[in-house]
């Protein structure tokens, strides 16, 4: 007997293979040439454009759109990559509705911004599909820089350093590069193995050596890197997850949403991936949304996102909330988990309604149970094993200026560093800016 | 609903919208459909002399330029006069006119500049029952190389001569279609007037190359790698056409000469503007070629609504703006305005700022939070900010009342009209009597 959304417990293949394939295609189909021209024509080429200001990497958006409109998408791509070497991925995963497109004056004028994200993808896809890498390395400097973490921050940092003629070695704990681009983003935002293709393309700059399955405490140490290299950049992200601190958290069926997403991204066969019938995702950020939507797309019958504050406080954007709702995900606001019920395996989640008082969230005493054979925790990640000797701020590596840590010769950026939103695009900006600062420092000597 | 019945040089039509002599009016099938769609009249595509018809190129004959969203703004063509047999055309004209007696049927003609040629064709056209003829002295490509079309229109003496022949050998109204490919449109209009023309129509198309293929280095439309200048038309030529219409309308030597306005008429509003500048009716081509015959419905409803709102008749509209067309030297230099930006309507694109700051008078300020404001003591009221603003009505020009101080000059605005002819900076100024 084949499985269906109604199969009890946690089961694979709840949907036929063709439905799964359909569910996990591109969330937004790429623009074709005609669509790109029509979309590009809407740009007003604003002065000191608000969209540029809203972009963490300061891409000259009006210029690249004008380049698309004048039939030179390759030049448009160079404009993008000048500022953001991961412009291809950012075009897919950026919450543009809260960044460039929110700032677009046509959002103010008509409630319909220029489709900046999709245009960026059109430009970057055009150039990348030609296999062209538009940058060349500067003269070799003989300097060596160690980069820890092959995620967006590390890759952006390494690429910029390589451009300047430095030699870079990237260490990453995982067997593949890309960081959250590879392991942590909803599948339908990065189809056709784009994350790997992008890294392969990025590495064409040359001068970057990759060392996988190597991490701080596993093959390398901060002190060792400091003495062996002219500079060190830390961009290893957040390896830990917060604990739920609810009873029954150890029951079968309770897991971290980031793991669920990583497994899904690495799965060769989506039909082999087990998923619950009744799923509760706890949390209110992008990870919660990605986990919820994808479990629904895998065929879960009921998916609920449980968030302890109100809708307006939810970190996930209204656009992401609507996306989830359109896929059939249910939201419960102002409620928190108390206990995972069940006998060995989870069967339900006992929750309590909350009252938000200033910054604190208090239980009201009123409880309810939701059927749950799978509980996914998406309540935030933490810096796992912070290197000794580096000052921390808010649980992350404290940085000032362009990613300088409290220790000379060590820079940090991306999710593991303090400040900034934990977005791919901010990680790219931080990695890039740290690279410029590193270059300035090591070029002095 | 206002009555749009038009009476142009004695030719009646249910509305003032005629299709110009051009591809849409080349044959019975099209013209019947145009009349069914509501067009008031047509000028049948230009007939040539009896005998073997002209041939057209067999590759592309049109080129275009575009605005945003690939809106066609300008079209050019290298098509010649009708390439169908003269008698086929004449028979079709006769049939269609008989079936649509209330519509205007004008026949465009272009034959060599010889009296015999005109003498031969005019009775044939007369026999169709058409309401009048239009002399094609404007076609700028192909036919002009053979001494016809614009080659005639560029020589006022020829215009006068041929017009006289037509008035001599044809009993109904004669309209002379003028080419804009000259320096002073009044000269050919005066010539037509002297020759006895009942009206002039203008403009014909403008010499143009719309684009160059940067791979093959051929002008477009490309015929086997070569291109020839074609006739330009469409919305892009409207300002040129309106200026020429107004020149004829306000010229003493052509005053009262009826004008059929042509050149980029796309909407009812364009038509109304031409008519306000002195055109008794309008002729349309490119808009129909771009969107089909149905656009006349909007022209009819729009013009009708406008006339109703203004309480005007169609005749009231004709020439109503002509007295306001003047020479630069008579413009009131004591009329002072300042740009005003509506903060409620502003979408903060900053184009007014870029335009003013980079290319004009540095008269718009920009704050940290993108509030754009006019600096009155720098603003010369050039209007560029109004023109580049993407939101209609967001930036306007406000007139300073007499007595108010113009912060740019520090002087109060004078209530008196004063123009360049009396301005102290004008070396040739005529000093007012003391």
Image (spheres, grey):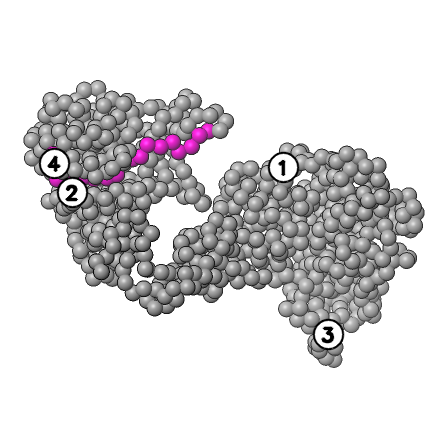
Q: Which residue is mark 2?
A: B254
Q: Which residue is mark 3?
A: A359
- Marks 2/3 same chain: no
SS at badge 3: loop
- Marks 1/4 same chain: no
Which mark is in front, 1 or 4? 4
For image coordinates 20% across by 47% down, the residue present is B250
Q: Quadrant of residue B56?
A: top left
Q: Residues within 10 Å of mark 3 (few under 14, many from 20)?
A: few
Outermost residue, top direction?
A: B52
Q: Which residue is mark 1?
A: A127
Which mark is in front, 3 or 4? 4
- Marks 1/3 same chain: yes
Q: Which residues are magenta?
A: B195-213
SS at badge 1: helix
Of residues A407 and B381, which is closer to you in this image? Answer: B381
For image coordinates 77% across by 62% down, the residue present is A380
**Chain under numbered label 3:** A
- Asked if the magenta segment contains residue B80, the reply would be no
- CB contact under 8 Å: marks 3 and 4: no
Tell me which numbered mark, 2 or 4, is placed earlier along the sequence.
4
Q: Which mark is residue B370?
A: none
Instruction: Compute the Cα span from label 2 to label 4.
Output: 9 Å
Outermost residue, front direction?
A: B434
**Chain under numbered label 1:** A
SS at badge 2: helix
Instruction: Compute the Cα span from label 2 to label 3.
Output: 83 Å
Compared across the picture, whether B14 is left or right of A372 comes to: left
Residue A258 in percent (x, y) is at 76, 56
Outermost residue, bottom direction?
A: A365
Q: Residues within 10 Å of mark 4 (few under 14, many from 20)?
A: some
């Amino acid at each position: 007997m084949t499985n269906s959304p109604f199969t009890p417990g946690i089961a694979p293949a709840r949907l036929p293979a063709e439905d799964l394939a359909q569910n996990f295609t591109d969330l937004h189909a790429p623009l074709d040439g005609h669509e790109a021209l029509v979309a590009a024509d809407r740009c007003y080429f604003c002065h000191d454009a608000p969209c540029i200001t809203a972009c963490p990497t300061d891409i000259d958006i009006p210029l690249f759109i004008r380049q698309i409109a004048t039939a030179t998408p390759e030049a448009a791509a160079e404009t993008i990559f000048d500022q953001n070497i991961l412009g291809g991925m950012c075009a897919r995963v950026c919450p543009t509705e809260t960044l460039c497109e929110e700032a677009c004056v046509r959002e103010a004028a008509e409630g319909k911004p220029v489709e900046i994200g999709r245009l960026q993808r059109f430009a970057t896809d055009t150039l990348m599909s030609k296999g062209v890498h538009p940058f060349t390395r500067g003269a070799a400097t003989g300097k060596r820089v160690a980069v820890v973490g092959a995620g967006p921050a590390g890759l952006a940092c390494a690429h910029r350093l390589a451009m300047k003629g430095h030699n870079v070695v990237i260490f990453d704990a995982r067997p593949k590069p890309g960081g959250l681009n590879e392991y942590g983003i909803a599948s339908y935002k990065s189809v056709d193995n784009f994350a790997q293709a992008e890294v392969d393309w990025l590495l064409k700059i040359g001068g970057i050596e990759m060392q996988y399955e190597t991490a701080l405490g596993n093959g390398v140490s901060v002190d060792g890197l400091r003495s062996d290299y002219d500079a060190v950049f830390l961009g290893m992200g957040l390896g830990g997850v917060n604990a739920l601190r609810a009873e029954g958290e150890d029951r079968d069926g309770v897991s971290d949403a980031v793991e669920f997403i990583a497994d899904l991204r690495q799965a060769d066969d989506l039909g082999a991936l087990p998923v619950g019938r009744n799923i509760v995702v706890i949390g209110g950020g992008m990870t919660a949304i990605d986990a919820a939507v994808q479990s629904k797309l895998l065929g879960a019958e009921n998916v609920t996102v449980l968030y302890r504050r109100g809708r307006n406080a939810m970190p996930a954007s209204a656009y992401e909330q609507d996306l989830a709702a359109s896929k059939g995900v249910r939201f419960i606001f102002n409620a928190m988990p108390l206990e995972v019920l069940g006998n060995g395996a989870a069967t339900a989640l006992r929750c309590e309604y909350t009252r938000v008082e200033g910054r604190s969230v208090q239980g009201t005493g009123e409880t309810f149970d939701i059927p749950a054979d799978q509980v996914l925790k998406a309540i935030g990640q933490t810096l796992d094993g912070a290197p000794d000797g580096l000052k921390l701020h808010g649980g992350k590596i404290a940085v000032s200026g362009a990613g300088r840590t409290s220790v000379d010769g060590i820079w940090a950026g991306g999710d593991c560093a303090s400040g900034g939103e934990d977005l791919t695009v901010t990680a790219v900006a931080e990695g890039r800016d740290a690279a410029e600062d590193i270059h300035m420092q090591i070029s002095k000597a | 609903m206002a009555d749009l019945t038009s009476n142009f040089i004695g030719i009646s039509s249910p509305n003032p919208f005629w299709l110009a002599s051009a591809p849409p009016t080349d044959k019975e099938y099209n013209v019947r459909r145009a009349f069914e769609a509501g067009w008031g009249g047509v000028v049948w595509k230009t007939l040539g002399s009896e005998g073997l018809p002209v041939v057209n190129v067999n590759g592309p004959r049109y080129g275009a330029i575009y605005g945003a969203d690939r809106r066609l703004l300008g079209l050019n063509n290298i098509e010649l006069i009708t390439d169908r047999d003269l008698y086929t055309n004449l028979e079709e004209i006769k049939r269609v006119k008989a079936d649509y007696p209330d519509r205007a049927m004008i026949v465009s003609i272009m034959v060599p500049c010889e009296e015999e040629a005109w003498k031969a064709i005019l009775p044939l056209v007369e026999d169709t029952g058409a309401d009048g003829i239009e002399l094609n002295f404007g076609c700028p490509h192909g036919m002009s190389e053979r001494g016809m079309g614009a080659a005639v229109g560029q020589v006022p003496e020829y215009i006068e001569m041929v017009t006289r022949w037509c008035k001599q050998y044809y009993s109904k109204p004669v309209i002379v279609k003028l080419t804009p490919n000259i320096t002073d449109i009044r000269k050919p209009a005066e010539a037509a007037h002297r020759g006895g023309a009942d009206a002039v129509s203008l403009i014909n198309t403008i010499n143009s190359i719309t684009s160059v293929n940067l791979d093959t280095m051929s002008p477009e439309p490309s015929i086997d790698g070569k291109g020839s200048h074609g006739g330009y038309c469409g919305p892009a030529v409207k300002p040129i056409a309106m200026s020429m219409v107004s020149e004829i309308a306000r010229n003493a030597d052509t005053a009262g000469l009826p004008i059929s306005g042509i050149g980029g008429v796309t909407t009812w509003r364009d038509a109304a503007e031409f008519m306000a500048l002195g055109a008794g009716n309008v002729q349309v081509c490119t808009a129909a070629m771009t969107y089909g015959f149905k656009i006349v419905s909007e022209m009819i409803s729009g013009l009708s609504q406008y006339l109703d709102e203004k309480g005007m008749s169609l005749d009231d509209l004709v020439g109503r703006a002509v007295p306001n067309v003047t020479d630069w030297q008579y413009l009131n230099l004591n009329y002072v305005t300042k740009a005003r930006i509506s903060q409620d309507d502003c979408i903060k694109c900053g184009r007014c700022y870029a335009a003013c700051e980079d290319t004009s008078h540095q008269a718009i300020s920009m704050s940290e939070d993108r509030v754009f404001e006019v600096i009155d003591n720098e603003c010369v009221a050039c209007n560029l900010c109004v023109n580049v603003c993407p939101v209609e009505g967001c930036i306007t020009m406000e007139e300073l009342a007499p007595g108010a101080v113009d912060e740019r000059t520090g002087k109060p605005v004078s209530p008196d009209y004063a123009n360049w002819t009396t301005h102290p900076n004008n070396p040739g100024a005529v000093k007012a009597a003391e």
